[in-house]
Image (cartoon, rainbow, N blue to C red):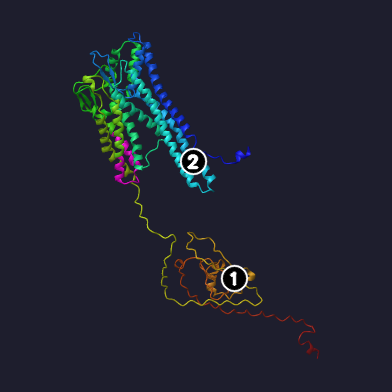
Amino acid sequence: MTQLTEHTPSFPAEPLVRGGRSAAVAAAFVRGGVAAGLGLGALAVLVTAAWISSPYPDSGPGEALHTAAGLWLLAHGVDLIRTDTLSGAPAPLGVAPLLLMALPAWLVHRAARDTLEPYMEETDDSAAARTAAGTAARAAAGTAARTAAGTAARAAAGTAAGMAAVAAVCGGYLLVAAAVVLYAASGSLPADLASAGLWLPLTLAVSAGLGVWTAAGRPLPRQEQAAVALRSAGPALVVLSAGGAAVFGASLVWHAAAAQESYAGLTGEWWGRVTVLLLAAALVPNAAVWGTSYGLGPGFALGTGASATPLGVTGTAALPPFPLLAALPGEGPGGWVHGAAAAVPLVAAVVLGAGVGRSARSWTGREAALTALLGAWACGVVTALLTAAAGGPLGSGRLAAFGPVWWQTGAAAVLWCGAVGVPAALGVRAWGLRGRKQAPEPTATPHARIPVPVPAPDLPPGPAPAPAPAAIPAPSGAPSRPPSFRPSFRPSFRMPFRLPFRPSFRAPEESQPQKAPGPLPGIADANDGASENGGEGAVGGGYGYGYAYDEAGFEPYDFLPAAWERTPPPLVTPPPPVTPPPLVTPPHPVTPPPPVTPGDPAAPGAEGDDA
């Protein structure tokens, strides 16, 4: 057991690639079919519930399932053909509710993301771990290069396997979609084959591509300008969509009475009203896109030969009774209220330019302008795709063209975002650079500062300085002084502050030689304080390194370059010593003679009397 755990596990060079890849592809294929079945089942439940709740159903449950299949195809952008018209002629139906399209798009996105995530983790984590283990185990054999090449090959193989799994997801989804097209062909809402061959794969590819992008961590282009352009186009698109919804909401509130009358006139049953309400809710995103197109300028078509723009409604509109269509502007020229819708693209373009300008402070003006133009094109492409999905035919004849024209709306978005976004980006960039100073151009400076010698200033003429007193040699019996410390380097720095003391490197008292007599009293008095701490009176004075010495010709070292040395002040001739006046000795006090007592034999003259 210990022998098995102590050895490094060996990874097979070729794992069960065929069997594992086949199983993964089969699982991905099934996952795609399940995603299609979930969307179709949700619509089937909804339509079947409506059929059950209807008090007067016109057909059986089979027709309800055919209707659910047709709605599922309509949710992918496929045009349907209505065969039960009053005239008996088939009429196309191509206005797909965008909220209904969100369900299958989300299911495909989730299936592609969940299928690719394990392969991305294998490529990022497991392959890196196997690389480290294999490299450490075979480094002694000199196979590190082959290990790196094998790891890169495995990573590429993992990525290819992941993309194959995503393709399998799309294949399973398309298989179910083909079966639904065949099933709906026998009902009252068959699919247009040309439209199905175009919009089904396109919707599937866009949704699966977003899933792959999400599984990869939502990366942006490595080129900085492209990444900033896409990042700035996102908020601009949000502003366009929100502004279009606000325009539509304001118009619906303004025409609330007409919308309520249309809603009440469609059906009198409660379930019929619920059905109309659900259909209107599914068409709210379409109305927001129509409002965006209205604010951009091209407007939208209200049938063949009729259109609505901020300048007014031209032609005779063919509007079927529906609550949302009651919010459309009336006939005649537009006023300032209709022109206020132009604020939507204006604000969106400013948002785009501000996003680019904040990131372009280190760029040139040309780079900032090109980045704003690239963001404008991104907004135009996305707006054109949304416009193409939000419109379509509602019937034949005058209703064959209904909704905004995709290429006109996309071109208007590019023009608005380019004409306003570029100046806004340049203005925001200039505003951000208003307080920034121009950085000086870098110059070739040496790493070490080399001082430039400065000539000493001319000293005023004066008497020659007195020679320094000679040192008296120490007696032969005195201990010798240790050799003086003379550093072998000269640092090129200077302290930015002055020390409150002067260090002294004096030798011990017992090893100091005998000094010569000090200078004159006047000079000694002036330098007493400095001489105590190595100042002017000490050897090397004036620079804080005074220490005694008795070597002839010794040069003191001050740790500073010669060009930075302080110029000594001019020597002042000491005044001549003042001779004090001679001291006057006070006279000795005169002692008086002692008094003479008569009869004293010691008194003078007593001896003569006796004679």
Range shown magenta: 346-372
Mark 1 and mark 2: Cα distance apart in space: 66 Å
- Locate the N terminus and report the quarter of the image it occupies: top right
> Between disc 1 and disc 2, whose residue precedes?
2
Nearer-the-camera pick, 566 or 316: 316
On residue 229, the disc is none
On screen, 338 above or below 497? above
The residue to which callout 2 is attached is 128
| Magenta segment includes 500 | no
Q: Nearer the viewer, mark 1 or mark 2?
A: 2
Nearer-the-camera pick, 453 or 429: 429
Q: Residues within 10 Å of mark 2 (few under 14, many from 20)?
A: some
On screen, 427 above or below 239? below
What amino acid is labelled 1 in the image? Pro
Q: x and y percent of residue 448 in the render?
A: 44, 61
Quarter of the rendering containing residue 195: top left
The residue to which callout 1 is attached is 483
Q: x and y percent of residue 148 in the render?
A: 47, 44
Question: Relative to 492, is 46 on the left or the right?
Answer: left
Q: x and y percent of residue 204 in the render?
A: 36, 28
The kind of secondary structure element at disc 2 is helix
What amino acid is labelled 2 in the image? Ala
